[in-house]
């Protein structure tokens, strides 16, 4: 498909009626569209940039194993709260096994260590109990490889010299890491299209109005100013992450009632790509300090992704970017957690920022870590449901897709029950045909979209510079554009968004 084709696709849906329109093509929107298309519904998915370009491309990429929830069991007040956290830990273990099976090649099992210091509230032996509990809650065949090092085995551990003098224990286990999440968003979007959904990237929802039994959606082409289209949909699923409240407000002015005006709070999080000493190659580090701050060094190719920061945002969030103060905080965190590595600013290869779509809380500027799907009663919605979500993580996206599908089914009436109730099959292994992702039917618009989202080459220590010319040539040939211009734009983006210096 050429650039011209890409720019005229919006016209292909003009005037069409869909059962469900999914707005936002991050991990949650693409997973929802795929689930609904699998169930036999007529689905439209629109994404204003490329698939996965929002929060989904900015995360630490961890498929958490449930350890956090177990730690909460210790702190939670009352048996009800303890039980709830135990249930959540079990759910994450089950989900971990399901994604391991259903996303072949998109998750990698990595060894992680947790350094335990004298000051830490959780004592080394407590990890024995926690991991025993996790296994009992359900390992489901995915190894967790737990080991604790103490006494001589701690002193002999090759990583011991890099941690602080007050180290009292070290545990290691296997954590799953998404092999760049945008790849999953692209694969879901393609699979949704193969299952019959109409899938449009670079197309934004601009406005909505009510019509009998549903919604009319005004769409704009983000690549061609002035090109618009309109479609109707019985139900709308708003999966636009930090933009959710803005989109919900459009629906409210069209008569939607029963929705809170605030559901999401952007919470800024930054990462820095760093080189750690050779013994850390392929090995992650995870530590939560006594204030509850999370430090992660996620092994990625030949370097580590260090983060995340966590900063409350007041007012409209500016374009995501790690500022100097964010990078300084990341370097300080690495120096504090791995003092023997002598990390300083020169070890930073590049950096980036993003926003978590945390749940809104009137009492907490940082927002709340609580996944919530808003689905007001449709008696006030004239039959056409409007759904929206806060704080849907990568880790929970399949759970979200299934919950949304159930809510849609419940609001669709007897005649519109899922045509297929079969379990969604695993994604096929990713095809090696690079050209398909560069010149295939879903774009791309920029070299950055190919290098980061589609091929993952941008997420390399050199930000993909060694490959950019080759990829630009293929893209230029397919789209009839200038490879030089593609490269120049790519370099400009690396400077602006990733702190690249040359
Ligand atoms: C620093 C950081 C670390 C994180 N670490 C982890 C982790 O380790 N593990 C984990 O599970 N989660 C993690 N998360 C959370 C996770 O990344 C997000 O919760 C998740 O990616 C949200 O996905 P989403 O699909 O809901 O939103 P998004 O990925 O933001 O997708 C929303 C999409 O909607 C599109 N959109 C907006 N407006 C419109 C419109 N008008 N029309 C059409 N499209 C529109 C946007 O372009 C965007 O692509 C982290 C997040 C951050 C920022």
Image: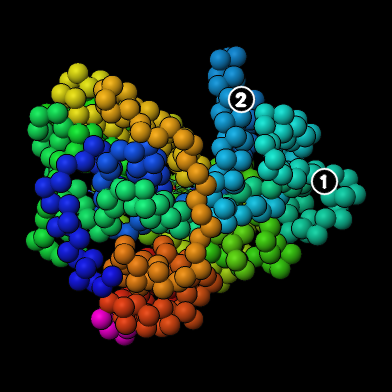
Residue 395, compared with residue 324, is above or below; it is above
Residue range of the region highlighted in magenta in the rendering: 480-484
The CA span between labels 1 and 2 is 26 Å
As drawn, is 145 to the left or to the right of 78?
right
Q: Is mark 2 within 8 Å of ligand 1?
A: no
Which of the two residues, 311 or 497, is positioned nearer the viewer here? Answer: 497
Query: Which residue is labeled 2 in the image?
Result: 86
Which element carries disc 2, helix, strand or loop? helix
As drawn, is 268 to the left or to the right of 158?
left
Q: Which residue is rendered at x = 35% and y = 31% of the image?
A: 418
Quarter containing the C terminus: bottom left
Reply yes or no: does residue 285 show up in magenta: no
Count of picture labels: 2
Q: Position of residue 6 (x, y in %)?
A: 23, 66
Work out whether residue 265 can be spotted.
Answer: no
Q: Quadrant of residue 324?
A: bottom left
Q: Position of residue 24 (x, y in %)?
A: 30, 47
Which of the two residues, 104 or 455, is positioned nearer the viewer here? Answer: 104
Q: Which mark is residue 263?
A: none
As drawn, is 361 to the left or to the right of 413?
right
Which element carries disc 1, helix, strand or loop? strand
As drawn, is 100 to the left or to the right of 126?
left
Q: Which residue is rendered at x = 46% and y = 35% of the image?
A: 422
Q: Which residue is rendered at x = 76% and y = 43% of the image?
A: 146
Q: Which residue is rendered at x = 47% and y = 70% of the image?
A: 433
Crowdedness near tag 1: few (<14), some (14–19) or many (≥20) residues, C-alpha within 10 Å: some
Of all residues shown, which one is farthest toward the top?
A: 79
Q: Quadrant of residue 468?
A: bottom left
Work out whether residue 477 can be spotted.
Answer: yes
How is colour applied across the structure in the image?
A: rainbow
Quarter containing the N terminus: bottom left
Query: Which residue is labeled 1 in the image?
Result: 149
């Amino acid at each position: 498909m050429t650039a011209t084709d890409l720019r005229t696709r919006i016209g292909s849906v003009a005037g069409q009626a869909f059962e469900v329109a999914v707005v936002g093509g991050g991990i949650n929107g693409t997973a929802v569209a795929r689930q609904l298309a699998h169930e036999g519904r007529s689905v439209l998915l629109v994404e204003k940039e490329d698939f996965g370009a929002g929060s989904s491309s900015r995360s630490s990429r961890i498929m958490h194993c449930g350890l956090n929830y177990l730690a909460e069991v210790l702190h939670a007040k009352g048996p009800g709260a303890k039980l709830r956290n135990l249930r959540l830990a079990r759910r994450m273990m089950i989900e971990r096994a399901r994604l391991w099976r259903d996303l072949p090649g998109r998750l990698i099992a990595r060894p992680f260590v947790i350094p335990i210091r004298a000051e830490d509230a959780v004592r080394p032996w407590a990890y024995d109990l926690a991991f025993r509990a996790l296994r009992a809650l359900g390992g489901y065949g995915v190894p967790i490889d737990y080991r604790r090092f103490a006494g001589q085995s701690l002193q002999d551990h090759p990583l011991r010299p890099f941690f602080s003098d007050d180290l009292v224990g070290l545990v290691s286990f296997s954590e799953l890491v998404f092999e760049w999440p945008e790849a999953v968003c692209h694969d879901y979007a393609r699979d949704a299209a193969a299952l019959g959904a109409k899938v449009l990237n670079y197309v934004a929802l601009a406005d909505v109005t009510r019509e009998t039994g549903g919604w009319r959606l005004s769409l704009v082409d983000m690549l061609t100013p002035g090109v618009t289209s309109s479609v109707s949909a019985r139900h709308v699923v708003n999966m636009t992450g930090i933009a959710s409240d803005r989109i919900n407000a459009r629906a409210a002015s069209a008569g939607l009632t029963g929705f809170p005006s605030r559901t999401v709070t952007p919470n800024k999080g930054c990462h820095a790509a760093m080189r750690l000493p050779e013994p850390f190659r392929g090995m992650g580090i995870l530590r939560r300090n006594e204030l509850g701050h999370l430090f992660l060094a996620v092994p990625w190719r030949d370097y580590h992704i260090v983060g995340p920061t966590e900063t409350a945002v007041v007012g409209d969030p500016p374009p995501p970017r790690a500022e100097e103060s964010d990078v300084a905080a990341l370097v300080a965190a690495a120096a504090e957690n791995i003092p023997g590595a002598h990390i300083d600013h020169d070890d930073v290869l590049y950096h980036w920022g993003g926003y978590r779509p945390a749940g809104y809380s009137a009492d907490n500027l940082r927002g709340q870590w609580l996944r919530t799907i808003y689905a007001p009663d449709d008696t006030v919605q004239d039959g056409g449901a409007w759904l929206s979500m806060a704080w849907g993580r990568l880790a929970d996206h399949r759970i979200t897709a299934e919950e949304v599908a159930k809510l849609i089914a419940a609001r669709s009436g007897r005649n519109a029950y899922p045509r297929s109730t079969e379990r969604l099959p695993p994604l096929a292994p990713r095809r090696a045909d690079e050209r398909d992702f560069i010149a295939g039917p879903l774009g791309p618009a920029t070299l950055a979209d190919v290098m980061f989202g589609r091929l993952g080459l941008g997420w390399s220590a050199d930000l993909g510079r060694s490959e950019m010319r080759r990829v630009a040539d293929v893209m230029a040939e397919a789209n009839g554009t200038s490879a030089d211009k593609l490269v120049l734009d790519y370099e400009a983006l690396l400077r602006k968004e990733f702190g690249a210096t040359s």
